[in-house]
Image (cartoon, rainbow, N blue to C red):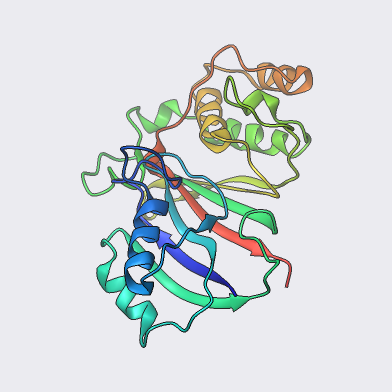
């Protein structure tokens, strides 16, 4: 029988989602605790990778298990997991349902805090420049331009082994939260390339500070080439926020 896990995590102290040798990851941590409670080696499949330091407000994974769960299983699992990870639910699904391949919509948020704030250093990019040097209008224009394209090789990490750089962009928008003095970037698509969102945020900030022009951006997207000035925004400001599946 196949089960879907709905969870969330603060990625600060993890080397990303995916298991890897000699590193603490979210996947390996959950597998260890599941295996301990169920007294059987459990392997889970996540809905996608997140890099070191990136967070997930909503994340799904699946695993297969044939026996009955112990009483109060989700509660007991949360008790032994570290404080950085929470399991919201574990639900039985069809045996063919796949956490990664059957997701058709993914959304991320990126948070930039405009004031120095020691309480935001793990969950936002505390922006080091003066606000008046950041043209939010141009950043919004840069984000809107993305909606005109479907090939995002411009924002694909070098030496990536990805088979296609085509993504169906559904939203790319900056929101200015005046009360909390922060910029929040909302982006949604059917899929993302590895590191793509952080490169897009870095591009928007470079446009906002005048280091990259809107014409430079358009040319790079049309030619499907990297920008001459590329910058990947820091990991801590990025959150995976919404995963959707066909019902």
Closer to the camera in the image, 206 or 21: 21
> Is 98 on the left-hand or right-hand side of 176?
right
Identity of the residue drawn at 25% across and 39% down: 116
> Is 212 on the left-hand or right-hand side of 181?
right
Q: Is residue 170 visible?
A: yes
Closer to the camera in the image, 79 or 113: 79
Farthest-out residue, left:
118
Q: Is residue 188 above or below residue 69?
A: above
Q: Is residue 13 above or below residue 198?
A: below
Closer to the camera in the image, 28 or 79: 28
Q: Quadrant of residue 70?
A: bottom left
Residue 135 image point, x, y percent: 51, 30
Q: Is residue 68 above or below residue 159?
A: below
Farthest-out residue, bottom:
71
Residue 81 image point, x, y percent: 29, 65
Residue 109 image point, x, y percent: 51, 49
Identity of the residue drawn at 57% across and 18% down: 212
Identity of the residue drawn at 67% across and 46% down: 191
Image quadrant holding the N terminus, namely: bottom right
Q: Quadrant of residue 79?
A: bottom left
Q: Is residue 178 visible?
A: no
Q: Quadrant of residue 40?
A: bottom left
Residue 176 image point, x, y percent: 49, 48
Image quadrant holding the C terminus, namely: bottom right
Task: Count every numbered label the image shows and give the total.
Answer: 0
> Is 145 on the left-hand or right-hand side of 21?
right
Q: Is residue 221 above or below residue 119?
A: above
């Amino acid at each position: 029988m196949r089960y879907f896990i709905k969870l969330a995590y603060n990625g600060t102290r993890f080397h990303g989602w995916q298991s890897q040798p000699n590193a603490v990851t979210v996947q390996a941590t959950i597998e260890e605790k599941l295996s301990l409670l169920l007294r059987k080696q459990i392997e889970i499949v996540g809905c996608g990778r997140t890099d070191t330091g990136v967070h997930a407000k909503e994340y799904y994974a699946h695993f297969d298990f044939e026996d009955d769960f112990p009483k109060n299983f989700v509660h007991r699992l949360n008790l032994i997991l570290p404080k950085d990870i929470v399991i919201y639910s574990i639900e039985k699904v069809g045996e063919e349902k796949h956490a990664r391949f059957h997701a058709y919509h993914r959304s991320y948020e990126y948070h930039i805090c405009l004031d120095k704030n020691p309480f935001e250093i793990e969950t936002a990019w505390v922006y080091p420049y003066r606000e008046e040097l950041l043209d939010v209008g141009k950043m919004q224009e840069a984000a809107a331009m993305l909606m005109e394209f479907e090939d995002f090789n411009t924002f694909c990490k070098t030496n990536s082994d990805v088979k296609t750089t085509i993504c169906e962009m559904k939203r790319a928008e900056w929101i200015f939260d005046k009360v909390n003095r922060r910029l929040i970037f909302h982006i949604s698509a059917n899929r993302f390339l590895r590191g793509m969102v952080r490169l897009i945020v870095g591009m928007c900030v470079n446009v906002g500070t005048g280091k990259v022009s809107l014409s430079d951006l358009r040319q790079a997207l049309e030619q499907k080439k990297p920008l001459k000035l590329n910058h990947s925004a820091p990991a801590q400001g990025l959150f995976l926020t919404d995963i959707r599946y066909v019902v």
